[in-house]
Amino acid sequence: MHEFVAQDHETLKDIAAWAAARLSDPAGALPPGHHPDRRPTALPAIAGDGVGMEAAWAWVRDAVLPTAFPTDHPRYLAFVGGAPTPAAVLTDAALSAASIYGGSELEAGAVVAAERAALRWLGGVLGYPSTAHGAFVSGGSMANLSALVAARHGRSTASGRPPAIVVMAASAHASVRAAAAIMGCDVVTAGTPDGALGAGDLNRVLDAHDPAEVVAVVASAGATNTGAVDALGEIAEVCADRRIWLHVDAAYGGAAMLAPALRSAFAGIELADSITIDPHKWLFTPYECAAVLYREPARARAAHRQQADYLEAAHDGDADNPADYAVHLTRRARGLPLWASLLANGTDAYVDAVERCLDTASYAAKQIEANPVLELATEPQLSVVLFRRTGWQGDEYARWSQAARYGGLGLVTPTVFAGETVLRLCFVNPRTTGSDVDLLLASLTGEVR
Ligand SMILES: *Cc1c(COP(=O)(O)O)cnc(C)c1O
C-alpha cells in the first residue's frame, strides 16, 4: 500500500516560520527577481514514489517561490498589486485547513454569515443599500462575467433571441471583452481609452442601438490603465432613461471610496445595477478575493442558481447560498479572510491604508514634476501615476523595466497612454514609502542607487 505522507510537525513549523518571516518583511524573506542565475535548472519529476513532505516543501521554498516577484513587495508598482494584511493571510491559511465548502449555508454554517457581513461592508463603502447582495468570486473577471450574465437573464429581443450587445467604456478592463466573447455578445465601445466616459459619448453610441438589444452598459470606476473614474452620475441617468442595466467595474478603484476626499468622484455608483470590487487588489486580502454585488439580488439569483435533484437539500427554505450569485458552485469561502481582517484591524485602519497609498502616489507625482528628465504624462488619478523619461522610447523603457526586475529593485512596467509608451506606477501597498519611490526614480535618471 502507498499511503499519503503523514503530517510532519517539523515541516509545519518551518512553513509557519517562513510565513511569519515573509509577513514581517515582504521585501526580504522572499527575494524577488527572475534572473537566470536564480532560476532552478529543472524541477524534480513527479514519480510513482514521492520524495516526502520535507523535501517537497524545500523545493517549493527554495526553487519555486523565490523566482516569483511577490505583489506585496513595496516596489511592486506594476499592474495592480496586492498587499494582504497578516490577519487576512493567516485566516486564509486556516481556511484551507478547515476544508469548507463555501457554496451553501447547509455546509458552511456561519462562514456564510461572515462573508455576508463582509459583502455588506463593501456595499456600504460603495453607497449601496443594505439589501444589496452578491458573492465573493475568484477575480474581477468572474465578477464582470457574472454581472453581465445576470443582466441578460430572462430577456429577449423582438426576434426572440437574448440581447447580444455589450456597450463598454473604451477604458474598461480586458475582462469585459472576454466576458462578452464567452456570452457570444458583440462589444461596442464608448468614449476614449485614455479619459473618463461621460453622458455625451455614451448617448451617441446608445442612439444607434435598440435598448432591447443591449445587455448592459459597463462603466469604469478606476480604469486599470489610468485610474480614470467615468462620470457615473450622468451615466446612471442615461441608463435609467433608456432602461439599460448599468454595471460599474470598480475592481481596482472602488477602494478609493474609503478616502473621504475622493468619494464625490464616484457619485452615482450607488445607482448601478451591479458593481465589481476586488478586495485582492486595494483592500489588502490574499488572492483570490473579488466581489460582485447587485443592487437587487433576486435577478442575479434567478440567473445563477443551479437546479438539480442532488442540490435540493442545499436550497431548503430561505438558505443564503453564495453559490447562487455568480458563475460557480463549489467555491472557497474567500470572503472569510476579509471579514476576519476587518474584525481584527477595524475599518479605520483600511481608510488609513488607502490614504497612505494615495499620499505616496502624490509624493511620486511631485518628485517626477521636480525632476528635469521626468514628466507626468497626465495628472495622476486615484493611485495611478503615468510618466515619461524624456528622450526614452519603447525599447529603453523595456530594458530598464527588465533590469529592475532581474536585479530585484522593483517591478514597474511600461504601458501606452495617448499613443505613447510611458511608465506606470500603481500604489496599492501602504508599506510603499517615499524612499521606495526615490530609489526607483533615481535608477531611471541615472543617479547612483
Ligand atoms: C484587475 C481588473 C479586473 C480583472 O480582475 P481579476 O481579479 O484580475 O480577474 C477587472 N476590472 C478592472 C477594472 C481591473 O482593474
Image (cartoon, rainbow, N blue to C red):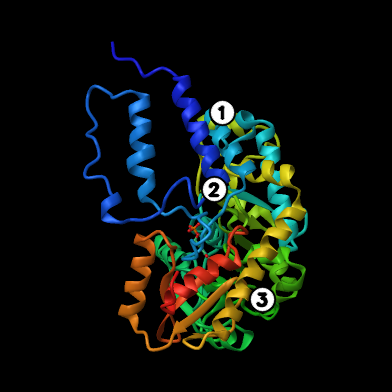
Q: Name the residue under label 1.
A: 98
Q: Which of marks 2 and 3 is in front?
A: 2
**What amino acid is labelled 1 in the image?**
Ala
**What residue sits right under mark 2 in the picture?**
25
Q: What element carries label 3?
A: helix
Of the two numbered discs 1 and 3 in the rendering, the one whose residue sits closer to the viewer: 1
The structure residue drawn at horizontal position 54% and vertical position 76%, both measured from the top left corner, is 385
Residue 358, percent from left and from top? 65, 69
Q: Nearer the viewer, residue 221 or 183?
A: 221
Give the farthest residue toward the front.
448
Residue 19 in the figure: left or right of residue 347: left
Tag 3 residue: 232
Q: Which amino acid does label 2 sit on?
A: Asp
Q: Which residue is drawn at 45% across and 64% down?
A: 175
Query: Which mark is first along the chain, 3 or 2?
Result: 2
* Label 3 Cα neighbours within 10 Å, binned few <14 / some 14-19 / many ≥20: many
Question: What amino acid is found at the position of numbered circle 3 in the picture?
Answer: Leu
User: Height in image: 121 above or below 407?
Assistant: above
- Nearer mark to the viewer, of 1 and 2: 2
Q: Look at 51% across and 79% down and name the residue there.
A: 386
Q: How far apart are marks 1 and 3 (CA)?
A: 41 Å
Cα–Cα span, label 2 and label 3? 39 Å
Quadrant for the N terminus, please: top left
